[in-house]
């Protein structure tokens, strides 16, 4: 591939020459990080982008966290008690919880925050559909009174995927959940430095000195003690890969979240560099079900039959580890149901054009939002664009920065009024474990995630999965959900790529999964 040949040849030599002069190296108490994309939205309940999630876990905290096995563990909670009938959950807050403005975290803040979260998150909506009442018993105690037992309650409150259930002050949690909070006041291990915030360039955080880490336990995906070893963390947005690589090699940056796999061999054998193990990332195509052409289920199915997943993942994964055989789920609910029949990689384009016309396609403009500053999204979009055009689709390839894409995808307007038809993006593999975590497979219309698929059958099956307590029955229901998804096509799973980071060798203490800034320190 020409891209890899170029990288392995001239890139390493030329990158240093193009490197801009960053500020003089900071003291050891400053960690400089290159994120995969810029931070455009500061509210992790109002937005689901990966940078917003990383930001959310830095400045906010959650009642529960997930350990390395994805089991929920108390985090802000000291613990909980469940009534004999499973209907009352009483959760006590642990001591030492303060917001960044100095106010203690109170139960009323928790209640307001979870009420707001439940209006945005699909898992939260499921929990609250089973809740009669959530109340503050006293300043340190909250109680869920349920309509029916729901053993997944801690898992919902501790989820690490989209719309994390962060706790914010009541005055912020009273904000309309569809409108992002702009003043950042959390109770997490870092405070946001608003005066230094420059979208697309610099995002800065400072150690919150009043933060009391949870005692005991191991650091997991989001659980355990969050011990901070840096006074300041800076995110430097460097969209150009060669420039980012040179910054890491020179020591002007400490940690790069998501280098392209082709960059990693360049630094192998360099004693000053190390690979940061991380989880996988799933690439997927999201379709807008509100407007032509993808409001037509037959057109969505034709598209599904033509997607060349292997070619897309080759472009995304390069010489790294990747696979193109995934379905909806990657965890215990994984199933092969209908995959081969749905993804045929068709190339009989004359026939496909006739089928599209027969299905009602009239040449409507297909606005494709492309995050050109995120290499994996760009690579997937470029490969798919070629296939879409061969199919006869009228592709409008709109190259934007990811911050703009992450805001524009929320628009429900028609494509000719600022809306869109589709976009590619990646999400961490832990989003796709089962029907509880995979919000992309939900199909609850305008109440759902961007794209707003509407399938009563998928929702009915998902409800059955939540109500089942038998693992074998849940697996069968998950297979049925997947088969229905190939008919309704809420989204198109493309493949999974391993997405390690790159750091200076003097850093240690990296936690599993997505980038976390507690525990990391210089050797």
Image: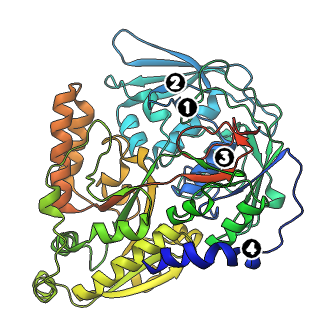
Find residue 220 and name its label.
1
| Label whose residue precedes the other's in the sequence (3 or 1) | 3
Q: Residue at x 47, y 46 (%)?
A: 279
SS assignment at label 1 = loop
C-alpha gap between disc 1 and disc 4? 36 Å
What is the quadrant of residue 404 in the picture?
A: bottom right
Residue underneath mark 3: 172
The answer to whether residue 29 is visible is yes
| Above or below for 239 versus 90 | below
* Position of residue 467 in the picture relative to residue 224 (left or right): left
Q: Position of residue 388 (x, y in %)?
A: 29, 82
Nearest the camera: 11 or 72? 11
C-alpha gap between disc 2 and disc 3? 26 Å
| Label whose residue precedes the other's in the sequence (2 or 3) | 2
SS assignment at label 2 = strand
Q: Position of residue 481 (x, y in %)?
A: 19, 48
| Label whose residue precedes the other's in the sequence (2 or 1) | 2
Quadrant assignment for the N terminus: bottom left
C-alpha gap between disc 4 and disc 3? 45 Å
SS assignment at label 3 = helix
* Callout 2–callout 1 Cβ contact below 8 Å: yes
Q: Residue at x 40, y 36 (%)?
A: 128
The answer to whether residue 199 is visible is no
Q: Position of residue 311 (x, y in %)?
A: 32, 71
**Please, which residue is most extreme toward the front here?**
269
Q: Residue at x 33, y 84 (%)?
A: 386
| Label whose residue precedes the other's in the sequence (4 or 3) | 4
Nearest the camera: 40 or 503? 503
| Label whose residue precedes the other's in the sequence (1 or 4) | 4
Residue underneath mark 2: 73
C-alpha gap between disc 4 and disc 2? 45 Å
């Amino acid at each position: 591939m020409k891209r890899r040949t170029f990288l392995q040849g001239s890139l390493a030599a030329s990158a240093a020459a193009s490197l801009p002069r960053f500020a003089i190296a900071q003291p050891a108490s400053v960690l400089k990080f290159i994120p995969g994309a810029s931070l455009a939205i500061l509210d992790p309940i109002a937005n689901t982008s990966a940078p917003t999630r990383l930001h959310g876990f830095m400045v906010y905290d959650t009642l529960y966290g997930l350990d390395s096995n994805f089991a929920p563990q108390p985090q802000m909670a000291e613990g909980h008690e469940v009534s004999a009938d499973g209907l009352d959950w009483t959760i006590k807050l642990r001591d030492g919880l303060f917001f960044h403005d100095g106010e203690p975290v109170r139960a009323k803040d928790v209640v307001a925050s979870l009420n707001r979260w439940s209006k945005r998150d699909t898992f939260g909506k499921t929990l609250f559909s089973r809740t009669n009442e959530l109340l503050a018993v006293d300043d340190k105690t909250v109680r869920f009174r349920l309509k029916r037992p729901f053993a997944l309650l801690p898992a919902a409150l501790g989820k690490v995927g989209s719309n994390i259930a962060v706790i914010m002050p009541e005055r912020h949690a009273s904000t309309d959940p569809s409108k992002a909070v702009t003043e950042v006041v959390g109770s997490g291990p870092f405070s946001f430095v608003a005066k230094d915030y420059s979208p697309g360039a610099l995002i800065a955080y400072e150690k919150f000195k009043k933060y009391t880490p949870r005692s005991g336990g191991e650091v997991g995906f989001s659980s355990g003690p969050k011990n901070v070893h840096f006074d300041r963390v800076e995110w430097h947005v460097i969209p150009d890969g060669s420039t980012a690589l040179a910054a890491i090699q020179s020591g002007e940056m400490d940690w790069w979240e998501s280098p392209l796999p082709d960059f990693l061999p360049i630094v192998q054998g360099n004693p000053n560099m190390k690979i940061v193990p991380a989880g996988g990332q799933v690439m997927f195509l999201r379709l807008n079900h509100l407007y032509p052409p993808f409001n037509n289920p037959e057109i969505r199915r034709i598209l599904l039959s033509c997607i060349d997943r292997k070619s897309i993942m080759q472009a995304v994964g390069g010489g790294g580890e990747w696979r193109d055989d995934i379905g909806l789920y990657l965890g215990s609910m994984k199933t092969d149901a209908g995959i081969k029949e749905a993804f045929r990689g068709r190339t009989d384009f004359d026939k496909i054009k006739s089928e599209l016309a027969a299905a009602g396609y009239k040449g409507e403009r297909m606005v494709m939002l492309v995050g050109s500053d995120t290499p994996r999204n760009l690579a997937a979009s470029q490969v798919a664009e070629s296939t879409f055009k061969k199919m006869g689709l009228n592709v409008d390839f709109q190259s934007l920065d990811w911050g703009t894409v992450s805001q524009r995808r929320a628009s429900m307007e028609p494509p000719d009024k600022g809306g869109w038809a589709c976009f590619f993006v990646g999400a961490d593999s832990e989003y796709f474990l089962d029907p509880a975590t995979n919000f992309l497979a939900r199909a609850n219309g305008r109440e759902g995630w961007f794209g707003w698929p509407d399938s009563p059958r998928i929702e009915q099956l998902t409800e059955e999965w939540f109500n089942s307590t038998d693992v074998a029955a849940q697996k069968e229901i998950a297979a049925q959900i997947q088969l229905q998804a190939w008919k309704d096509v809420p989204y198109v799973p493309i493949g999974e790529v391993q997405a390690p980071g790159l750091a200076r060798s003097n850093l240690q203490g990296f936690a599993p999964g997505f980038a976390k800034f507690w525990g990391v320190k210089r050797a």
